[in-house]
C-alpha cells in the first residue's frame, strides 16, 4: 500500500494545495492530508474549520483521508505507516527550505521518501499567508480557493 502524508498548515486550503493533491492521486493508493497544529502557535482559522473545508473539497475522493497531528512529521508518518511525504515546490526558496527538511527527515527515518511536485505555473504566487490577508481585510479570495469551499462556513 503506497500511503503518503501531505502535511501542512492549510490555513486555509488553497487551489495550490488542491492541485498538488489531485495530481498526486494517481501515484499513491492513499493520501492523508495531515493538518499540523501546535499549542504554542495558533492558526488564523480553527483546526476544525480547516479540516472541514478539506473534507468538503475532497468528499468525493475515496483515496483521501484527513487527519491532524502535532509534533514531528516523521513520528506521525511512522504512526500511520506512511512511506512517503508529499510536498509542493513553487520557487527556489521553497526548494532550499524543503531540501533541508527532506534530508533531515531522511536522516532521522530511513523509511521515508519525500516526493515533490512542481506547482502549476498559475499557482506559483498563491500561498495561504496572502489568501489570509485578503480575507482578513474583507477582500474576495474566491479565485484562490478550491471550488465548493466557502470561507464563511
Ligand atoms: P507549511 O505550513 O508547511 O508551509 P502549507 O500549508 O503552506 O504548509 O503548505 C503545505 C504544502 O503545500 C507545502 O509543500 C507547500 O509547498 C505546498 N503548497 C502551498 N501552496 C502551494 C501552491 N500554490 N502550489 C504548490 N504547492 C503549494
Image (cartoon, helix red, strand yellow):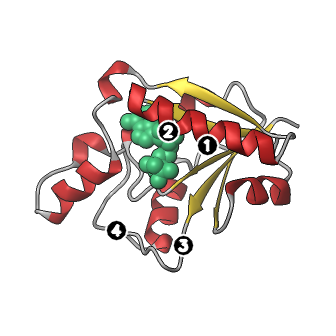
Give me the residue at 69% from left, 43% from top: 104
Q: Nearer the viewer, mark 3 or mark 4?
A: 3
Q: Mark 3 and mark 4 in contact? Answer it, CB < 8 Å.
A: no
Q: Mark 1 and mark 2 in contact? Answer it, CB < 8 Å.
A: yes
| Residue 21 shows in the view | no
* Mark identifier at residue 38: 3
* Mark identifier at residue 97: 2
The residues tagged by marks 3 and 1 sit, at their Cα atoms, a distance apart of: 18 Å
| Residue 44 shows in the view | yes
Name the secondary structure under disc 4.
loop
Name the secondary structure under disc 1.
helix
Q: Mark 3 and mark 2 in contact? Answer it, CB < 8 Å.
A: no
The residues tagged by marks 3 and 2 sit, at their Cα atoms, a distance apart of: 20 Å
Residue 94: image x %, image y %? 44, 34
* Mark identifier at residue 153: 4
> Which mark sits nearer the N-terminus, 4 or 1?
1
Say left or right for 150 vs 136: right
Amino acid at each position: 500500500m503506497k500511503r503518503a502524508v501531505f502535511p501542512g498548515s492549510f490555513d486555509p486550503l488553497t487551489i495550490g494545495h488542491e492541485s498538488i493533491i489531485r495530481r498526486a492521486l494517481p501515484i499513491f493508493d492513499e493520501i492523508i492530508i495531515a493538518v499540523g497544529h501546535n499549542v504554542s502557535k495558533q492558526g488564523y482559522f480553527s483546526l476544525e474549520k480547516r479540516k472541514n473545508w478539506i473534507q468538503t473539497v475532497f468528499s468525493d475522493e475515496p483515496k483521501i483521508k484527513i487527519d491532524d497531528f502535532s509534533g514531528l512529521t516523521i513520528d506521525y508518518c511512522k504512526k500511520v505507516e506512511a512511506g512517503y511525504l508529499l510536498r509542493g515546490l513553487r520557487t527556489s526558496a521553497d526548494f532550499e527550505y524543503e531540501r533541508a527538511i527532506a534530508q533531515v527527515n531522511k536522516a532521522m527515518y530511513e523509511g521515508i521518501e519525500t516526493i515533490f511536485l512542481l506547482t502549476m505555473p498559475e499557482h506559483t504566487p498563491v500561498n495561504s499567508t496572502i489568501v489570509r490577508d485578503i480575507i482578513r481585510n474583507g477582500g474576495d479570495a474566491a479565485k484562490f480557493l478550491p471550488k465548493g469551499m466557502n470561507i464563511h462556513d
